[in-house]
Each structure stands twice: as C-alpha cells, then as structure tokens.
Image (cartoon, grey):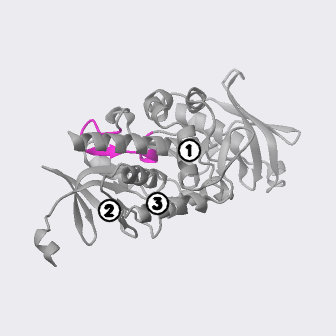
Amino acid sequence: MDNLKKLKHEPVPLAIIGGGAAGMFAAAVAAERKIGCLVFERKVRLGAKMLMTANGRCNFTKDVPVATFLRDVGEPVASWAAAALQSCPPQSIMRGLKSLGIRLRRMPDGRMFPDSGQAATIVHAFGDLLRDQDVPLCVNCPVTGLQPVKNGFIVATAHFTVWAQNVLLATGGLSFPKTGSVGDGQDFARYLGHRIEPCRAGLTGLEIRDRAIAAQTGARFEDGEAHVLDATGQTVFSALGEVECEDWGLSGAAVYNCQRWLARHGLNGMSMRISFGGQTRTVRALIPRPLKEAIVTIGGVSREDVDPETMMSRKVPGLFFAGEVLDIDGPTGGYNLTLAFATARAAVVAVQNRLRD
C-alpha cells in the first residue's frame, strides 16, 4: 500500500497501435531495449493477418542479400526502404526467430518458413516473448482517436484514454478487413496532415472470362510464367512461379507479381501473356480482384511525409509508422513481412534515441 502514495501520472514511452506483424515486431524490439510500451489491437488476438500468410505457413522472409532483396522489391519503394533493410536484413530476422526457439525451413529459392509449417508458431512465439517481458496488450480495443498534445499524444479508445510520449502506427493496409486492417491508421494520419496515396489491390488475381480456364478450376501449375506486354507486344516485366486456375480467372505467384507491377506503375494499354500447363493465354482486360482480397495494399501514408531513416513523421514529431500503413509493398515471397519487420525496428530504434535526448 505504501507504493500507492508514490504513484505518478506519467506517459507510456511508446504506444503501438496495431498488433499485426509490424506491431508485434516493434513491441519485441522495444522489450529488448527496455522501452516501456503498450500495444493496442482491435481484434481479440495478435497477428490475425500473419496467421493467414502463405496459406497459413508464414513465408516470413527471403534468404537473399539485401541488394538482391531491394532489386526484387523495385522502385519507387526500394531506395526509400534501403536504410531500414540494411539495418534489419533477412538474415537478422532469421537469427531473431531462431533465438525464440523457432526452427526454420529454407526453400530452394530462398523463401523462409517455420519448420512446423504453421504461422501460429511465429505468432505464438511473439506472444510468449511479450508475456515474458511484461509488455501490456490491449486486445479487442480499437483506437478511436489520436491527438497530439504538448508532451506527446492522447490515444483514445471507446472506454479510456492513454497519454503516450511517442506513437507508432502499425495498423496495416485495407486488405482482408476481417483481420482488423480497416484503414484507421491512414485515417489518423490524414487527420494529422499527411498525404494518403490512393489504396488499391496488390498481389491479387486477375478476372478472366475464359471457359477453358474456368473448366480447370482448382488446377495448380508450379512452373508457370507471366509476362507484361506493352502496346507493341514487347515484354516489360516477367515473373515465374505458380499459376492457379479459378472459376473467375487466374491466381498464383506469377500472376500476383505481374499484377502488382502493373498496379504500382499505373500503366495503360498493357496486356499479359500467361503460360501454364502447356498452354498460353494472352489477357487484354486486366481486371484485378477486389482490394479486400489482395495480399498487400498498394498506397497508404506517403513516403514523402516519413523519414526513411527513422520512420518518424516529417509533420508530427513523435509519430512513427511501420509496415503496410505506409505506401510500401513488395512481391510475394516473404518480402512484405520483411518490410514490416524492418520498418518497425527502425521506428523503435528512433524512439529510443528520441527518449535519450
């Protein structure tokens, strides 16, 4: 009871809004560096979308050099994300997961999975770490407002408010909203004066009206190819990998990566030549599946409004961003989780430096 007489009303050093891949990783880095933090998650458990990645197997990174990783990500994202990835490369992420007792499996192309083949292995390891480090979690607790004040921010929920010195927005994009990615982070950023780049589907299938494809619904072809063609028929981008027939068209890694390239570059007059199972289809009406079904969201908080070295807002000191809430994305194959982890680490390191000043 004597301790009650000594209680002071002090801010939490870091409030993390979002308990997905970026938010969990940020909280783990904060715990390692002894930074007091509080995690807000609108769903009843952490990592809901991460549990879905790679059909529940969680392809969490790709074991390639940073230069190769950045080349695969491509511009305009690669040069902006370079500093974060150099400080938190795939090999560092792998070492970190191994330190949590997770056995890893490397595929021939470098894709990395937990050896269990279960995304829950990684999500539960993060949960155990945060529990053991006494990191408080406010789950089933959507943040309803974010207001800068003289000495930090007021983070509001439906039932209480929290005073935080620094805030990290790690709320994700707008795909798979049932996992909690509903765009609230983008709304907070917009309210605080940040530009939001239009959000659209990335890494999603293409709707193709073709009876021959529909007749093969469920068929998968591991050695598929997809090529984006310009108006003259010249190939401007290519991707290899799985092609899968759906009743509405085609999906799979080769299709996803070409669709992302098209969406990111916003080019018109393009067509796509897709080869699989000994057949080739040329598609001219490139209609992507809806954003809510996409693996990743293209668009979000403008990169120009965020310092790529620290992930701190250029407009609101003490406000940081990580992961898919930002206008950053990569191809399928572990790239997007790596971008989430690397930007989260950069943000927490910057928070620590700011707390020291």
Residue type at numbered disc 3: Leu
Ranked by sequence position, the earlier of labels 2 and 1 is 1
Q: Position of residue 226 (x, y in %)?
A: 73, 35
Residue type at numbered disc 2: Val
Ranked by sequence position, the earlier of labels 2 and 3 is 3
Q: Which residue was labeled with disc 1? A: 95
Residue segment shown in magenta: 311-327
Are dots 1 and 3 in contact, CB under 8 Å? Answer: no
Q: Which residue was labeled with disc 3? A: 129
Q: Position of residue 310 (x, y in %)?
A: 34, 36
Nearer the observer: mark 2 or 1; the answer is: 1
Secondary-structure class at tag 1:
helix
Q: Which residue was labeled with disc 2? A: 143
The magenta stretch spans residue 316: yes
- For the N terminus, the quadrant is bottom left
Horizontal side of residue 147 vs 59, given as left or right: left
